[in-house]
Amino acid sequence: MAYDLNDLQAVVAVARAGGFREAARNLNTNPSRLSDAVRRAEQQLGVRLFNRTTRTVALTEAGRALVENLRPALDEVETALDKINGFRHTPRGTLRLNVPVSAARLILPDIIPAFLARYPEIDVDIIAESNLVDIFSAGCDAGIRYEESLAQDMIAVPFGPRTQRFAVVASPEYLAFAGQPEHPTQLMQHRCIRCRYHSGVISDWEFHKGDETVRVQVKGPLVVSIGAAVDLAVDAAIKGAGIIMLFEDWLAPAIARGELKPVLEPWWPEFSGPWLYYPDRRLVPAPLRAFIDFIHELNAYERESGKHDTGTLSG
């Protein structure tokens, strides 16, 4: 009996994503179409592949056995198609990246436009979110993370600035009212605007000066989730709601306009820059290979010139 390859691919996609909605988002389709494909596969095979409830979708024993055997075969199909893509003068296809919101805001605007100009037949799909995800289940080719969050079985390429800083700032109006702290511990007497991670953790603020490290458990009237809500926190700081600690590059425009003033600048902590990471496998998809080569070229240019200018790399 001949089986529809697209239906079998739908089964694997749903299994990887853990549900129809997430798989549909990964494949840029709709859940009902994937559900129909899975139903056709089950009818052809004569077995149930998923146990479905209103909240969960889980592989049956038969479904797990099928997916475990299908994945290598489908990977071989993708490999064969990508080898053909490698013969093209200009790679084509879709590059899907999972990135933190900070990278989407602060780093990618200097890189993606030049990459698209270099490779007009490659589409780039950016999924920006602050919670750590499995790029396999998210249907992504690669991701961007900081060093402490990298999985050990991934290949990592330096991406963007190699050193960044957290800045601490407040509006001139707030500082005129509450005073300028001279030591990190004095922040405990101030209204601070805090950020919550996807896990629910609100981290202490950590400062470094010479060999001294100080951690402060700050308090304040506003807590926002890390991600798009950070813009709300910055706006609140500009309007005098309190002191905020955030990426220096994120705050730089407001500092330059005089809307925010540096606080405790000698204590601002530095940290290493992000990495592009992707799975270690035999053949990297052509769009991802093009992007990796582009990043290597950009890194080499920056080492030689000390500049971060992608304009010369787009042609």
Image (cartoon, rainbow, N blue to C red):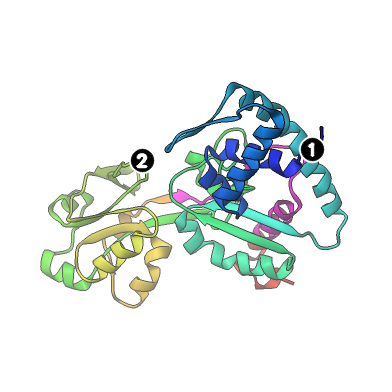
| Furthest residue toward right | 87
Task: Classify 18 as above or below 66.
Answer: below
| Furthest residue toward bottom | 257
* Residue 139 visible in the displayed image: no
CA–CA distance in space, label 1 to label 2? 37 Å
The type of residue carrying mark 2 is Ser
Is the C terminus in the top left, top right, bottom left or bottom right quadrant? Answer: bottom right
Residue 119 location, quadrant: bottom right
Residue 272 drawn in magenta: yes
Which residue sits at x=55%, y=40%? 17
Q: Nearer the viewer, residue 285 or 28?
A: 28
Specify the label residue 166 is tagged with.
none
Q: Position of residue 159 (x, y in %)?
A: 59, 53
Residue 283 drawn in magenta: yes
Is the N terminus in the top left, top right, bottom left or bottom right quadrant? Answer: top right
Q: Position of residue 284 (x, y in %)?
A: 74, 45
* Residue 85 visible in the displayed image: yes
The type of residue carrying mark 1 is Glu
Q: Is residue 237 left or right of residue 288?
A: left
Answer few, some or many: residues within 10 Å of disc 2's Cα (few below 14, many 20 plus, some between 14 and 19).
Answer: few
Specify the label residue 199 is tagged with.
2
Which one is closest to the eye, mark 1 or mark 2? 1
Specify the label residue 76 is tagged with.
1
Q: Position of residue 300 (x, y in %)?
A: 69, 58
Q: Nearer the viewer, residue 82 or 248?
A: 82
Please, what secondary structure does the residue beneath circle 2 have? Answer: loop
Magenta range: 271-300
Which residue sits at x=21%, y=72%? 172
Q: Is residue 69 left or right of residue 223?
A: right
Q: Is residue 298 left or right of residue 148?
A: right
